[in-house]
Amino acid sequence: MIISQATDIRTLIRAYITLTKPRIIMMLLFTALGGLFLASRGVPDLATTLLVLVGGTLASAGANALNQSMDRDIDEAMRRTQTRPVVVGMIPSHHAVIFGIAVNIIAFILLASLVNVLSAVLTLGATLFYVIVYTKALKRTSTQNIVIGGAAGAIPPMVGWTAVTGTIGLPAIYLFAIVFFWTPPHFWALALLLKDDYARAKVPMLPVVAGVWETKKSILLYTVLMLALTSMFYATGAVGLIYLVSSAVAGVLFIYYAWRLLRNPEIQGAKGLYLYSLLYLAILFTAIIVDSLVKF
């Protein structure tokens, strides 16, 4: 009996961890870390860093829980998401809502009281934008859902910056813009791979509504805009040569993958672009962190 209860508790804990989408959280936290290092011009204060990471984890976990509760019907229709905990009933939908709201309240109080109010407001704003604007308003109605909704995922590096400076400066805006323009090619590459799933779930993702060719052209356009932004960032003086060289090389490779996808038939090359887009973001923010430590 005791063994069975312990197993049930472990299973429930694993279900809640899955509910939070931990891989996405790790990516968001790494961009926040980039903002912390950039604003500090070196190693950020340890206490501030831990508070931002904990607050960001809680807020992101809550946002993802609310998203899965609201998207239960979509997740149930898509093969990729049919085993999510809310869909299979491991976590009741209203429990996911309670959890999502509760951890966001904790994150806001933590950041507002121990970091600063601006960082807390930005973090809460990211959750509200993701849940209300993206999940509720745009995901089921517009092909531009991920373009506009991507603003939520672009806020964490700004939070890292404001946690140190207390203000939104030009470098923070550039960090936001870079992630904002990175999101569409990243997500549309995935959407190409899952277009049949999205069509089945009646989600108007760009490949479903506009077709594969238009999606591939849009991916290339946003990739070029992203490379332009990353290059312009150097002109602000906030980053140095390590960042410039790393972002230029990684950006040219991104364009290569996008161009190859455009020239290939149908969705051939979409998986390679999707995987590289994840690596690209890691390279970019690693360069920001290293550049903050070693200025050239």
Image (cartoon, rainbow, N blue to C red):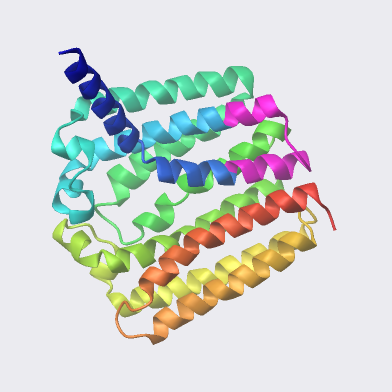
The answer to whether residue 80 shows anywhere in this view is: yes
Which quadrant holds the N terminus? top left
Q: Picture coordinates of residue 161 (x, y %)?
A: 67, 39
Give the residue drawn at x 63%, y 49%.
173
Q: Residue at x 71, y 42 (%)?
A: 37
Asked whether 140 or 185 is in front, the reply is: 185
Specify the farthest residue to the right: 296
What range of the chain is rendered magenta?
Answer: 32-52
Residue 240 belongs to the span the image colors magenta: no
The residue at 64%/46% (across/down) is: 34
* Rendering coords of residue 114 (x, y %): 62, 19
Q: Is residue 47 magenta?
A: yes
Residue 166 seen anywhere in this rendered image of the structure: no
Q: Nearer the viewer, residue 228 or 5?
A: 5
Q: Position of residue 74 (x, y in %)?
A: 19, 49
Residue 147 vs 81, above or below: the answer is: below
